[in-house]
Image (cartoon, rainbow, N blue to C red):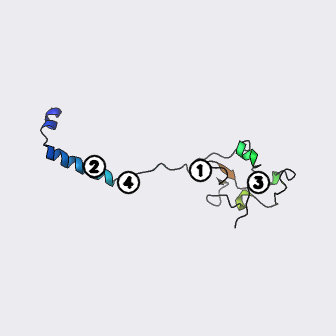
Amino acid sequence: MSRRILLNVSRREFAKKLAITAGTAALLPIREPRAAAPAQLPHLDVKDPAAVALGYVEDASKVNVKKFPEFAKGSTCENCSKLQGTAGAAYRPCDLFPGKLVSVAGWCSGWAAEL
């Protein structure tokens, strides 16, 4: 029976319904895939190759000053210009480690003073 109903629709009626459907679909908002929210990102592991290369530690008081003489007491991820995200969070995104969160109490040799 449904086949019979479809055959009884005129071309003009079909074209009109198709235009209405296409126009309605064009008005619907297009959603782009969102990047992972910072809370969903994993914490940077100190054994991660990128972390090792930059001497990342989760606690700046544990920086090996012999290995990293450029370390200045008081410098942490929290006062680094590369740290992103909302102040107050214990772990936040960093420009140097995309897709990972760093400890705000941490430090790495990529540290740069906030301007």
SS state under label 1: helix
Residue at 74%, 57% (x, y): give it: 111
For discs 2 and 4, the disc positioned in front in the rendered view: 2
The local crowd at label 4, few if under 14, some if 14 to 19, many if 20 or more residues have their Cα within 10 Å, is: few
The percent position of residue 46, horizontal first and vertical second, equals 74, 44
Residue 64 percent coordinates (x, y): 84, 50
Give the labeled residue for mark 2.
22
The residue lying toward the viewer, choosing from 10 and 1, is 10
Nearer the camera: disc 1 or disc 3: 3
The Cα atoms of the two marked residues, 3 and 4, are separated by 44 Å
Which comes sooner in the sequence, label 3 or label 2? Answer: 2
Q: Is label 3 in a helix, a strand or a loop?
A: loop
User: Marks 4 and 1: which is nearer the front?
Assistant: 4
Dot 2 lies on which element?
A: helix
Disc 3: which residue? 109
- Indicate the position of residue 71 as horizontal and vertical percent values: 81, 57
- Mark 3 Cα within 10 Å, few/some/many (few <14, many 20+)? some
Cα gap from disc 2 to disc 4, whole angstroms: 13 Å
